[in-house]
Image (cartoon, rainbow, N blue to C red):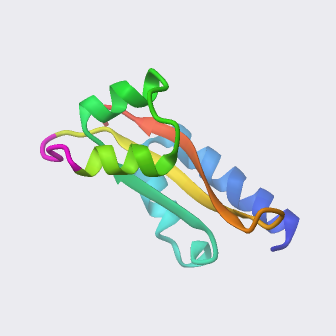
Amino acid sequence: MDMWLEEDVQEEIDLAKLEGLEAVRMVINSWHHDLFTWDLLPISIETANKLLQGDFDTFDEFYEFNIEKDLSGNLPFVLYREITNTNRNEVVYIIETIFINE
């Protein structure tokens, strides 16, 4: 992927994060972000607490713990992205932001 294009996308996401959850949702759902793997994930309060305490070793562990919880009500959201580490041929997940009580 073009390095400058990736920087432009990151800048657009960063500006949207300053405006809040709905602005981020609009940016990642826009047509020109199909090439990028950004997503918003609702998480339980318990999951958010454990994430902030550093209790998860992997994204999979975090994700599995979260899907076992009640995901109803006014929940926090995590903005994350997937990138491929071409040296190790594996997917890496990066948690960008936690939106709380939007």
Q: Position of residue 10 (x, y in %)?
A: 70, 54
Please, which residue is most extreme toward the top here?
53
Magenta highlight on residue 59: no
Q: Main secondary structure of the magenta part?
A: loop
The magenta span reads: 68-73
Query: Which quarter of the picture shows residue 102?
Result: top left
Asked whether 47 or 27 is in front, the reply is 47
Residue shown at 71%/51% (left/top)? 11
Q: Position of residue 68 (x, y in %)?
A: 21, 48
In percent of width and height, residue 97 lies at 51, 39
| The one of 45 and 59 positioned closer to us in this rendering | 59
Q: Residue at image x 60%, y 60%?
A: 82
Q: Residue at x 54, y 38 (%)?
A: 18
Q: Relative to residue 48, is residue 23 depicted above or below?
A: below
In the rendered image, which quarter is residue 46 located in? Answer: top left
Residue in the foreground of this view, choosing between 53 and 21: 53
- On the rendered structure, is 97 left or right of 1? left
**Residue 71 lies in magenta, yes or no?**
yes
State the image coordinates of residue 38 (x, y, percent, origin top left).
54, 61
Q: Quadrant of residue 91?
A: bottom right
Is residue 51 left or right of 95 when viewed as pictured? left
Nearer to us in this view, 69 or 8: 69
